[in-house]
Image (spheres, rainbow, N blue to C red):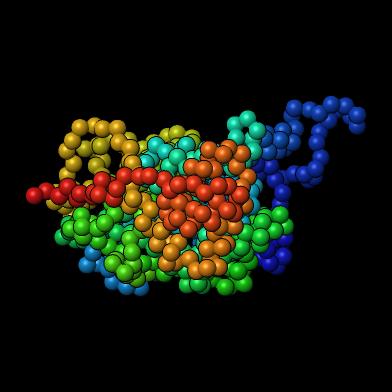
Amino acid sequence: MPSQQVFSKPDGATYTTSQGQPVQEPYAAERIGLNGPLVLQDFHFIDLLAHFDRERIPERVVHAKGSGAHGVFEVTHDISDICSAGIFSKVGNKARATARFSTVGGESGSADTARDPRGFSVKLRTEEGNWDHVYNNTPVFFVRDPAKFPHFIHTQKRDPQTHLKDNDMFWDYMSQNPESVHQFMILFGDRGVPDGYRFMHGYSGHTHKLVNKNGDFVYAQFHYRCDQGTKFLTQDVATKLAGENPDYSQQDLFEAIDRKEFPSWTLCVQTMTPAQAEEFRYNILDLTKIWPHSQFPLRPVGKLTLNENPQNYFAEIEQVAFSPSHLVSGIEPSADPVLQSRLFSYPDTQRHRLGTNYAQLPVNAPLHLPANFQRDGGMAFYNQGSRPNYQSSIQPLAYKTPTYSTLAHEQYLGAAVADLSFVSELDFEQPRTLWTRVFDDGAKERFVQNIAGHLGGVKSDDVKARTLSVFGAVDADLGNRMAKAIGHAPVAPLKVAPAGEATRFRANLKA
């Protein structure tokens, strides 16, 4: 249904071709006589078809199904002691924001009530450039080894022969990569299907670095805490909605903003010094682990409010391009290998999907037009005029001196190694806490039934047995309940390396 804006605001513009020539009848096509063939000279008709044939751009490989809106981010608390970013220089500073929420595995036409993590991306247009938050609604993820990511995503999509979603390959991946069990437990728990996009948190997952004006840094993780509180859908309700309204979450977000029920989130940060990071039980570069709030409390930073629907979904939401590499001074990436791989992959997929000059699209452009030596390429509608396309002494640019030095930050020296993590008892501690201390009896029963409804469809007994052994390693009671729920004999818990053999984090600071 069209928005109220469309109903209440007449248009009345004169219909034209793409070149601005008025056309009397948009449905007419020129032909020779009333029964003859069409004529090639009918530019309006030929242009109409040619453009129609090219309307679709490649959809995102992941996060294809999404919704979004615009709004404002306002700094509410002073964190200038730990971060020198200009946006945090004063309480009350604001930045225009664009947010996009999404499912991960489904195609653009899939249901947005699927049991799937949700993307939670925000573009902040600051005076120092765009700062993108490319987060999820879960604090951990399935992988910590970046080369596993394409393989994992393949298992969440379609079988190459049957072109069907496949439970066997879904659980085959999990059972061979048990470090993913923490995310799988969150996914199949009550938080696995948010009730739309307005009632979920957002998490950076990755560790970043915040640097102050003196060059001192702390490690940091960001959290968007939902001001509306969180709500989730049961499996039965989510499945019903997927059939009745596959755009439930899109509709809910758009109509809420249309009613002026503006959703908001409080941005908070957890911080850890390098010394604390080295003493922390878990490796801070491991995307499958959380930082307990009891040890590293949330510090409020600001508030994101979405108060404006897009005028055109394709131009403003489908074409918006986020990347973890879009950072501002004072905020830096850590050595998290999955984050490092995303720094490359996200801009690369946008160049493929939108074109070389994707950053020139209005929704992606920074507040201040760039001044650099990038030129030409497809659709270069801001090509910087007569400015030299090299570092010229005739018409030189100005260069801003960094506000801090990183000479005392991490230093890395070593041979190039093919690194692959291994599973240890540490990988089951946080999932075990989730099962024994976070899930109540009702949540446990729903979790078991959610898993059983999916794992029960697996054909391979080996995959079932391996999966049960992973859940048994989390907790023996969980493994036994899961086996009973799918009608399988109990399986011994998976044997893994002791916790003491896990790779420890080292800050690699200059002595």
Looking at the rendering, in which quadrant would you find the N terminus? bottom right
Image quadrant in which you'd find residue 75: bottom left
State the image coordinates of residue 13 (x, y, percent, origin top left): 69, 55
Image quadrant in which you'd find residue 217: bottom left
Instruction: In the displayed orientation, state which residue is furthest to the right.
Output: 35
Q: Looking at the picture, does residue 462 appear above or below residue 278?
A: above
State the image coordinates of residue 81 (x, y, percent, origin top left): 22, 67
In front of the other: 397 or 96: 96
Q: Is residue 420 left or right of residue 410?
A: right
Can residue 499 be seen by looking at this rendering? yes
In front of the other: 405 or 372: 405
Residue at x-position 70% and y-position 45%: 16
State the image coordinates of residue 444 (x, y, percent, origin top left): 52, 63
Q: Looking at the picture, does residue 13 appear above or below residue 35?
A: below
Can residue 370 be seen by looking at this rendering? no
Residue at x-position 75% and y-position 32%: 42
Instruction: In the displayed orientation, state which residue is furthest to the left.
Output: 511
In front of the other: 366 or 349: 349
State the image coordinates of residue 145 (x, y, percent, origin top left): 37, 41
Tally of numbered tags: 0
Residue at x-position 24% and y-position 32%: 416
Q: Is residue 403 left or right of residue 43?
A: left
Residue at x-position 55% and y-position 68%: 442
